[in-house]
Image: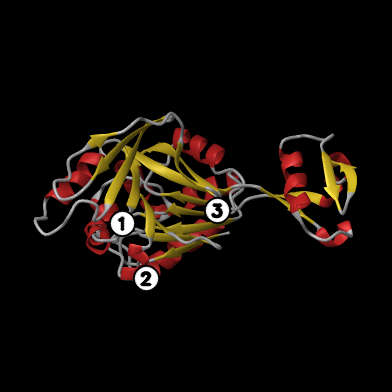
């Protein structure tokens, strides 16, 4: 199950740390000016997911660099078109004469269209770009037990929204089987996943057809987590959101403006409280979370904004 934690104070720029049960690494979504990061958390980040590089989403990437130099492993950075040059520019703005090759490697993945990802690598001390083979998918990151897909939204520039999806797993009720565990469990799961109903499964020196044991299995649906930052509140963005994040367990979605400031939202290609709530309702999201509020608002305004969001669910 995914655990997402806001690392920013309510009046700070957005940053969300994502962790997964029984998983070694952290995943960072957005690099706002978050005061609640720890050095250990940042050093343990395996991938960074940036929606776009407006300053409030990218300003604190320098601190990621600061804490990761010397970890001696690869970190993936995901974002929209041209983020590679922007990451490189940040890295090249510092002097690296005391840093050796391999202190850290950044692999940068740019989703440039719905199904094309450009891939580059950067290494110290010169941080020159090395282009790698592109990927033709919207799966921008993948681990053994989960994937991250991206969709492009309109914020007057392309921005990326991310869906973390845990792989569905086959579970078995050992107690109901009446048998002890063993390698037959793995073989039965394989037969189920590969639709090998006639496969012979040997349990305690007896032979069974896999299909006669399938009733012991059930498919456990993987968890899901969405991160939707800046986007214009218009129908095409909403169509993409409701399609991609349908039935998601939890989604963090921008609510930059109160309803009374809808005109500002339209002018600045942002969403507003009631519309973000409405699109979450239409996507059937179980736990929608309003985040990323305009800095023009104080605590009382933000509380009202949150109430407007909830009223639209």
What residue appears at the point 27 percent right and 41 percent down from the top-left corner?
A: 121
SS at circle 2: helix
**Residue occupied by mark 1:** 31
Circle 1: element type: loop
Q: Position of residue 158 (x, y in %)?
A: 33, 37
The residue lying toward the viewer, choosing from 225 and 85, is 85
The residue sitting at 28% across, 38% down in the picture is 120
Mark 3 near mark 1, Cβ–Cβ under 8 Å?
no
Q: Residues within 10 Å of mark 1 (few under 14, many from 20)?
A: many
Which of discs 2 and 1 lies nearer the camera? The answer is: 1
Looking at the picture, tell me which residue is in the foreground, 170 or 161.
170
Give the quadrant of the N terminus: bottom right
- Whether residue 155 appears in this view of the structure is no
Residue 299 badge? 2
| Mark with earlier residue (2, 3) | 2
Q: Give the mark nearer the N terminus: 2 vs 1.
A: 1
> At which x and y percent is residue 264?
32, 48
Give the spatial CA distance, label 2 vs label 1. Answer: 22 Å
Q: Which residue is mark 3?
A: 312
Residue at the limit of the structure toward the front, as seen here: 205
User: Where in the figure is residue 244, as x and y percent of width and height?
Assistant: 53, 39
């Amino acid at each position: 199950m995914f655990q997402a934690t806001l690392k920013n104070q309510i009046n700070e720029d957005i940053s969300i740390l994502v962790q997964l049960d029984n998983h070694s690494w952290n995943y960072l979504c957005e690099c706002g000016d978050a005061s609640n990061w720890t050095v250990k958390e940042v050093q343990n980040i395996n991938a960074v997911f940036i929606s776009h590089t407006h300053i409030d989403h990218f300003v604190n990437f320098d601190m990621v660099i600061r804490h990761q130099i010397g970890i001696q492993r690869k970190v993936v950075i995901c974002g929209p078109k041209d983020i590679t040059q922007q990451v490189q520019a940040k890295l090249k703005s510092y002097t690296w004469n005391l840093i050796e090759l391999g202190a850290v490697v950044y692999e940068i993945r740019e989703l440039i269209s719905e199904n094309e990802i450009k891939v580059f690598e950067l290494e110290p001390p010169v941080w020159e770009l090395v282009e790698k083979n592109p990927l033709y998918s919207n799966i921008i990151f993948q681990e053994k037990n989960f994937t991250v897909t991206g969709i492009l939204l309109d914020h007057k520039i392309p921005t990326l929204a991310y869906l973390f999806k845990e792989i569905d797993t086959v579970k078995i009720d050992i107690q109901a089987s009446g048998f002890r565990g063993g390698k037959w469990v793995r073989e039965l799961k394989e037969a189920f996943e590969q639709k090998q109903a006639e496969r012979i499964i040997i349990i305690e020196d007896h032979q069974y057809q896999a299909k006669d044991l399938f009733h012991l299995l059930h498919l456990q649906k993987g968890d899901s987590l969405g991160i939707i930052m800046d986007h214009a509140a218009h129908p095409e963005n909403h169509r993409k959101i409701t399609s991609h994040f349908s039935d998601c367990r939890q989604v963090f979605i921008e609510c930059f403006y109160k309803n009374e400031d809808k005109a500002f939202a339209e002018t600045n290609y942002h969403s507003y409280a009631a519309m973000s709530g409405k699109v979450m309702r239409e996507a059937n999201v179980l736990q929608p979370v309003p985040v990323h509020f305009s800095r023009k608002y104080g605590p009382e305004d933000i509380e009202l904004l949150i109430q407007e969001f909830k009223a639209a669910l």
